[in-house]
Amino acid sequence: MLTKLPWLGPLIVFGLVVFVHELGHFIAAKAFRVYAPRFSIGFGPALLRKRFGETEYVLAALPLGGYVRMASRHDAETSFIEGGGEAETDALKPGQKGYDPEAMMPFGPKPVPENRWFESKSLAARLFIMIAGVTMNVLLAFVVLAALALAYGEPVIATRVVGAVRPVPTAPALSGIQPGDTIVAVNGAAVRTWNDIAERIDRTSSGAVVLRTQRGDVTVPVGTPGTPTTQQVIGALDFHITPVIGDVLPGSPAKRAGLRVGDTIMTIAHQPVQSWSELQERVTPAAGTDLPFEVRRGGKLVALTIRPEPTTQKDAVTGTTRSVGKIGAAAADPTTREPIGVGDALIAGARGTWITAGKIVGTVRGLITREVSVRQLGGPIAITRASVAAAQSGLESLFYLIALLSVNVAVLNLLPIPILDGGQILINVAESVKGSPFSARTRENILRFGLVAILLIFVMSTFNDVVMGVKDIMAKLFG
């Protein structure tokens, strides 16, 4: 159904990720007996609302987040964000729709007992409530990735052929490995896939990794001063990938030049290309330079000219940052799938969640240190487009996107911006250290600052989305 109705993709992606996050806060608040009169998905005017028990559940017009409204002595400071409060002036009056004479404010005349305020709970309880949303997002990603691994199998790179070897100053011995070599064993143990190679290198506990190829053994010292880590050794070795295009990014140089999915790169700058690594070697140093490409498409040779865009990138091996050329195209997926059991699926889910979180943290760090350009930020339009594309590709792609976005929401909500969970945690800890709450004016100013910061990020990411969309349209119109 999703492939026929791809517009459902954004609703499912946004809705599920936001719902799970707010559900975490809601369940934790209920567990500690905090009065929570409103559970809202979205902001702004309510499209649907229904009260069950002491909570009103709302579906609002702007699906860019959500909130759980909790009884608080700081109600006035937060009501400008969440819309309405639990103060006497906000309560329903007799005769109004939804008024309940037996209910607490805002649905009835009864005041909220102080022991049900958020601030009446211990610092540990408040922190638990605030971190519960992030925890639920991480749990959602873990469950989704584990379920996908169990349903579709584990991705396996079914090759042992080396595509490229990146130089590592602390590992001169790696020069003994050449592109085209086949790694047949690591530390004396036979390997059958690239997954095995990476895993056995990572497990090395002694002072050296021994790589056996069809030409002999290469010993690489690791784990001691002046030698690389096992992760640097893994990062230095690339597996062989045929130069077939698997994806072309909208608005990219490759898209504008007419490169298509399924094209096989034959030559770049009139030099033969045998692997994806060779493609990268030609493109990386050519930022801002026109490169003639020759591709095979449907049995015919097609000539294209692509100008790689300069992009700031951190070297996975050395950790240094440099400007490299990128054309905005990805190789065809080289992986196959192998069935796995429940235990291995759980491990795969945990590993995938951890790796994804690490990449997002790295991106945020790069934005702060200016190693990553703010132009790479994507907003709601980009997420919507990605959701539609994922829905068109099928359930697996859609749920991978859900897991990715859920981890994004978890990590970004921990940023110390006042209206996010991380900012609220910081405020509560600061008040605990101070020994008294901040004044109402101070809290309101802090929240307004946070709101402005979030709006700036939203405007910037949306601007990037619009620019990318305009580039894509221009490329379609003018090739």
Image (tube, rainbow, N blue to C red):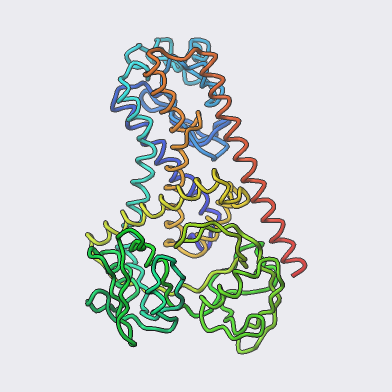
For residue 9, above or below residue 204: above
- The x, y position of residue 362, in whole percent, is 47, 50
For residue 433, above or below residue 395: above
| Identity of the residue drawn at 57% across and 35% down | 454
Q: Nearer the viewer, residue 444 or 162?
A: 162
Q: Nearer the viewer, residue 411 or 269?
A: 269
- The x, y position of residue 265, in whole percent, is 59, 81
Q: Nearer the viewer, residue 333 or 314?
A: 314
Quadrant placement of the C terminus: bottom right
| Identity of the residue drawn at 29% across and 70% down | 209
Q: Is residue 277 visible?
A: yes
> Which residue reaches farthest bottom?
299
| Identity of the residue drawn at 59% across and 57% down | 312
| Identity of the residue drawn at 36% across and 57% down | 352
For residue 214, above or below residue 68: below
- The x, y position of residue 397, in whole percent, is 45, 61
Q: Which corner quadrant of the image does residue 326 belong to?
A: bottom right
Q: Is residue 153 visible?
A: no
For residue 359, above or below residue 300: above
